[in-house]
Amino acid sequence: MPIASLSPRKALPLLLALFWLPGASAQSKASADPGAVSDDVTRFWDAYDRVRDVADPVQRTRLLQDLYIEPGSPGLKAFLEVKGCTAEKYADLLQRYPRFWDSVRSRSLSAAARTVALQPELEKFRALYPRMRPASIYFVVGCMTSGGTTRGDKVLIGTELALGDPGVNISELPERTHRWLEGYFATRPAEMLTLLNVHEYVHTQQKGPGPTLLAQSLYEGAADFVAERVAGKLPPLPYVQYGPTHLTAIKARFAREMDASDYGSWLYNGNGDSAFGVGDLGYFVGYAICRAYYERAADKREAIREIIELDYTDAAAAKAFLDASGFYPR
C-alpha cells in the first residue's frame, strides 16, 4: 500500500499474527509461524529518552547506533536496509523535529496492543489462499520514509507513520513533507493498520518487483485487490476515489507509458507529482486490471492464486496477464 510515498507507502499510496510470540522467542519461530514483533518500538523510545537532550550530534548518533540499531530485530535491520535509515539520519531527524516525535510517541507505542486485531484477517487470507506462506511482522520506528514495506518473508511497519492521525504535530516539517503528511494523516492510517498489514503480507507471497510500469503497477494493485477480498475495503487514499471517475483518461495515458521503466509519474509519488495531480495512480490501474481478470475468471479461487503467483519480474508475463484481463478490449 502506498504509504511510503509513503508510498509514504510504500505516501501512498500505506502496514499481524496468527499467534502472538513475544520477544526473542517470536523471532526464533519466525520460519515456522507468523509472528508480530514490536520490541523495536519500545527500544526506540527508550533510546529517544537518552538522546533527546544530547547536544553533540556525534554522541547522539553513537547512542542511537548502540541503543536502537545494534540490538535491533532482524525486521529492523531489514527496514533500515530497504529504506536507507542510519543512526546519522535518526539523530538529525530527532534534532530537527522534536514536536513531531513527541506527538507520535504514544501512537507508535500502541503497536503491541493492536496486533490482536490482525489475527482474524490473516485467517481469512489463508482461507482465500491456502498456499499462503508464513511471514513475520515487525513493528519498528522508521526515519519518516515509509509506513509499510517488505523484505523477503518480513512485513515491516514504520509506526511513526502507519499509526498516525490528524493530531500528529507536523508544524516543523518542510512544506513538501508537511503537505504529504497532512494529506496522509487525514486518512487516519492507524484505523487502516490491519488493511496495510494484509497488503504488505500479500507482497511476501509475490515475486517482484516489476521491471516496467505495468509490471510494478500490477504488483502493487494485486496486493490492494487481494487485501480488499480479505478485509472488504480499500484504503481511503486519493487514488481510490479519483481512479474510477477518471478511468478513460487514466487508461489512455497508462497505455502509452506502461512499458517504461520509470514509475515516477504513477507510483510512490504521494505528493501528487503526476499528470493528473493525484499520486499513486499506478496502484489503481493495477488493481483495476486484477479486478477485470478476476471478474472474467470462471474459477475465482484459481484466479486469486494466479494473481498472487504471477511472476511480476517478467515483463512478458505481466503483458500476457493484461491481455487476458480484457482491461483494454481488442
Image (cartoon, rainbow, N blue to C red):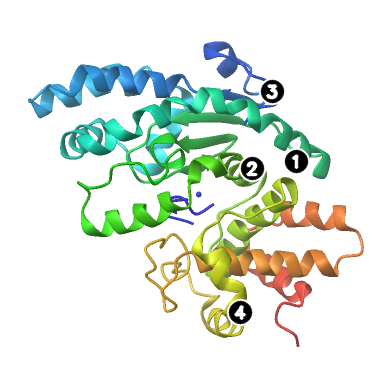
Q: Earlier in the sequence, mark 1 or mark 4?
A: 1
Q: Which residue type carries mark 3?
A: Asp
Q: Earlier in the sequence, mark 2 or mark 4?
A: 2
Q: Verify CB contact (< 8 Å) between mark 2 and mark 3.
A: no
Q: Which residue is mark 4?
A: 247
Residue 33: which numbered mark, if any? Answer: 3
Residue at image coords 25%, 30%? 87
Q: Which residue type carries mark 2?
A: Val
Q: Which residue type carries mark 1?
A: Phe
Q: Label 3 neighbourhood size at 10 Å, few (<14), some (14-19), many (20+)?
A: some
Residue at image coords 12%, 22%? 54
Residue 254: x and y in percent read 55, 78
* Image side of residue 56 versus residue 286, left or right: left
Q: Whole-Å distance between the Cαs marked 2 and 3?
A: 16 Å
Seen from this angle, which residue lies furthest bottom? 330
Mark 3 or 4: in front is: 4
Q: Which residue is mark 1?
A: 125
| Quadrant in the picture for the C terminus | bottom right
Residue 315: which numbered mark, if any? Answer: none
Seen from this angle, which residue lies furthest right? 298
Residue 198: which numbered mark, if any? Answer: 2
Q: Earlier in the sequence, mark 1 or mark 2?
A: 1
Residue 280: x and y in percent read 48, 64
